[in-house]
Every structure is written in C-alpha cells, then in structure tokens.
Image (cartoon, rainbow, N blue to C red):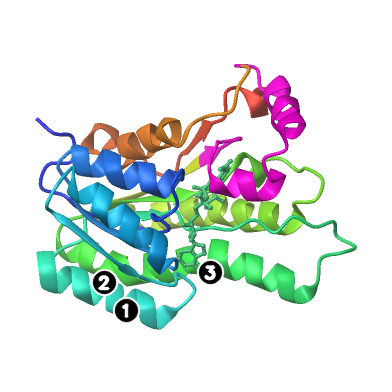
Amino acid sequence: MARLAGKVALITGAASNPGIGYATAHSFAREGAKVVATDIDRANLEHCQTSLMTVSDQILTWRQDVTSRQDWIETVERILNQWGRIDILVNNAGVVILKSIDELTEEDFERQMRINMTSVFLGTKQVISTMREHGGGAIVNLSSVAGLVGAPGVSAYSSSKAAVHLFTKNVAIECAKHNIRCNSVHPGSIHTNIQKTVFKDIPEQFELINSQIPLGHMGTPEDVAASILFLASDEAKYITGAELVVDGGLAAQ
Ligand SMILES: NC(=O)c1ccc[n+]([C@@H]2O[C@H](COP(=O)([O-])OP(=O)(O)OC[C@H]3O[C@@H](n4cnc5c(N)ncnc54)[C@H](O)[C@@H]3O)[C@@H](O)[C@H]2O)c1
C-alpha cells in the first residue's frame, strides 16, 4: 500500500529543480498523496506541475508567497474547497542570505527571518484548525544543520533555522493533544539550486565541502525527501517534536 494513500499534502517552495521541495512533491505523489505544490516562482512551478502530472493526476499547483498571510489564507481555502482537508504541511520554502555580520543590514536580517521563519509561523497558524477538525495531521519544517551549529557568514540564516527548530518543538507540545505532530528536518549540504546560488558552481568549493563530510559527498534532494516522507507518514505516528539530521555525518564531528 502506498505510504501516503488518501492524504492531502501541501509542500511550499516546490518549484526548484533540483530542490528539496520538488523532490518531496514527487515522492509524495508516488506514495499516493494528493499533492498541492506551491512556490513564488511561477515559471518553474509550471515545469514542476508538468513533471508531477506524469506521476499522478491528483496534483494542484499555484503561486504562493509564504511571507504573505493573505496567500496562506487563500491557499488553505483553495485546498479545503478542492479536497476538504489538509493532512500534511511541509514548510520547505527558504532562501539563504550569505553575509558577514558587518555586511548584514537590518533589512537583510528581517527579510531572512520573514522568509524562513515567519512563514512557518503563518503556515502553521493557518493549517492547525483544519487538522484539528479532521483528527490530526503532520507538519514537517525544514530547518538546517546551520540551525544547530554556527558557521561564518550565515548568522541571519542560522538564526532563522534555529528559530524554526525550537518553534517546531513548541508546536509539537501545544498540538499533541489534537494529534498534530510537528518535526524538523536538518539537511547538511544538499546539491540543490540554493547551493548552486551560494557557490556559483565553483568546482573547488564543492570539493572542499565534500572533503568535510564524513560520508564524503553532498546529499541529494531525494535523500532529504526520504526523511520528510517518513516523518509525514503514519510510520512516524509516535514521533513529534524531534529533529532529524540528514547531513552525511557533518554535524556529528
Ligand atoms: N540545499 C541545502 O544544502 C539545504 C541545507 C539546509 C537546509 N536547506 C533548506 O531546505 C529548504 C529547501 O532548500 P533547497 O536547497 O531545495 O533550495 P531551492 O532554492 O532549490 O528551493 C527553495 C524554493 O523556495 C522558493 N521560495 C523562496 N522564497 C519563497 C517565498 N517567499 N514564497 C514561496 N516560495 C519561496 C524558491 O522559489 C525555491 O523554489 C530551504 O528551507 C533551505 O533553507 C537546504
């Protein structure tokens, strides 16, 4: 039996290929979920929709800016009108602002927090009432290894991901009585468009990253999608408030 049969899942930031949201939307569709894939990037979202339709016909995609409360309200309304429930929310959309503390402006910091953290708060607020009405649900938040340990040049990003980490635990505790589980996934270095943007495809930079990872190489979006799938599925029905690190051993050193 498919691992998400009958579930309705919303995945944000799903347009980027290669990307974690894109891989997650495809794995959820293969596992029988009705998938709503949203993103701010309309052009890539069209490619994502075409690709998802080759896997399943239970697919909806539309543009959603996760920093907009109105977009969250409309997104949840549209899903409820179409499928009547939301069982899974994957708060995946995110960006990284790479600057030293000296270079970082107040606007940079606030933008980083709004896209990576405030969005998770807004999304959680919008879905929990409908999850509660339907007997529960699962929320998976994308944090990062950078939300667990510090590194140069990522103070704003790290702060946003550390906030997601602890917000996840608070949601888990507050919502446990409604059978809503909430967990965070902490990728290390994963070969996606975000990494390409950060390192601009400089081969030496990739070699340096690979040499620092105990398993010897960066992860794939599918490596992370597999962990998100597990936490979203009923296989993880007794897991809430947990963090799952997917980093090839990077943070274990
Ligand atoms: N790739 C990594 O190494 C890595 C490591 C740790 C954590 N993460 C986290 O995983 C998540 C996915 O990252 P990825 O590597 O797949 O990145 P990606 O850049 O490939 O995908 C991110 C997606 O988010 C979308 N997005 C950005 N701002 C948005 C907004 N305001 N509203 C809606 N969508 C928006 C982008 O358009 C893009 O499609 C992010 O939260 C990221 O911080 C990634």
Kindly identify the residue that appears in the image at 63 percent across and 17 percent down: 216
Magenta run includes residue 205: yes
Q: Residue furthest top?
A: 215
Q: Viewed as shown, does residue 95 lie left or right of 25?
A: right
Residue designated by label 3: 118
Q: Which residues are magenta?
A: 186-215
Q: Are marks 2 and 1 in contact (CB under 8 Å)?
A: yes
Asked whether the viewer can see residue 174, the reply is yes
Amino acid type at circle 1 is Ile
Q: Residues within 10 Å of mark 3 (few under 14, many from 20)?
A: many
Q: Within 10 Å of the Cα at label 2, are there few (<14), some (14-19), or many (20+) other Cα atoms?
A: some
- Residue 74: image x %, image y %? 29, 79
Amino acid type at image mark 2: Val
Q: Are marks 3 and 2 in contact (CB under 8 Å)?
A: no
- Say whether disc 3 or disc 2 marks the residue closer to the N-terminus: 2
Q: Is residue 185 left or right of residue 157?
A: left
Q: Residue furthest right?
A: 102
